[in-house]
Amino acid sequence: MVMSFGRNVEKTYTYNILENSQIKPLARTDQIKDLGILLDERLSFRDHINDKINKAFLMLGIIKRNFKHLTVQSFTMLYNNMVRSHLDYCSSVWSPYMKKDIEALEMSSKKSYQDSATTKTHELF
C-alpha cells in the first residue's frame, strides 16, 4: 500500500513492485492504521480521535453492564484501566491541537466519569 502525506501531493503516479517476475501496481490508500493510530493524508488525526472517543464509551458500557455495585476506588481503577487508557494511548504522537478536538476529548472523559461515578457508587452508601 502507498500513502502520500501533504497538502498538494501528486496522486497520479503509480508505484510498482516486482513479484514473481511480474510487475504489480501498489494500491493507494487515504488512511492507514499503524500501531493503533489512524493516519490520514493531512495528519489531522480527526478520525483517530473520534475512534478513541467511541472506544472509550464502548469500554464504559462494558463497565456499566458487568459491574453493578462498585465502590469509588473500584470504579476509579476500572475507569483508569479500561477507559482512560484508550484516551491516553500514544497521545504524544496524535496530541490534539484543534480546539474542537480537545473539547471533544475532555467532554467524553468528563461525561463518562461523572455518569458512571454517580450511578454506580450511590447504591453502596
Image (cartoon, rainbow, N blue to C red):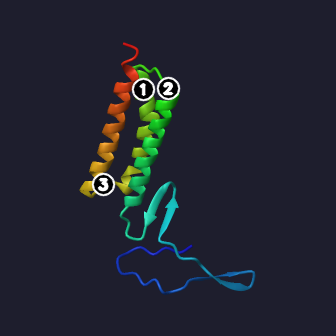
Q: Residues within 10 Å of mark 2 (few under 14, many from 20)?
A: few
**Which secondary structure lies at badge 3?**
helix
* Rendered-image quadrant of the N terminus: bottom right
Looking at the image, residue 115 sits to the left or right of residue 70; the answer is: left
Residue type (three-letter) at the residue carrying disc 3: Asp
Give the Cα separation between the discs numbered 2 and 3.
Answer: 30 Å
Q: Are marks 1 and 2 in contact (CB under 8 Å)?
A: yes
- The residue beneath circle 1 is 75
Q: Residues within 10 Å of mark 1 (few under 14, many from 20)?
A: many
Residue type (three-letter) at the residue carrying disc 1: Phe
- Report whether residue 72 is seen: no
Q: Give the number of the mark in front: 1 or 2.
A: 2
Instruction: Please give the label number shown on residue 48.
Output: none
Instruction: Please give the label number shown on residue 101.
Output: 3
**Which secondary structure lies at badge 2?**
loop
**Which secondary structure lies at badge 1?**
helix
Disc on the earlier residue, 1 or 3: 1
- Residue visible at 35% across and 32% down? 115
- The residue beneath circle 2 is 67
Give the Cα separation between the discs numbered 1 and 3.
Answer: 26 Å
- Residue visible at 47% across and 42% down? 58
Q: Position of residue 11 (x, y in %)?
A: 46, 83
Question: In the image shown, does 22 or 120 lie closer to the viewer?
Answer: 120
Q: Position of residue 68 (x, y in %)?
A: 48, 23
Q: Give the number of the mark in front: 2 or 3.
A: 2
The quadrant holding residue 16 is bottom right
Compared to residue 12, the image places residue 54 above or below, namely: above
Disc on the earlier residue, 2 or 3: 2
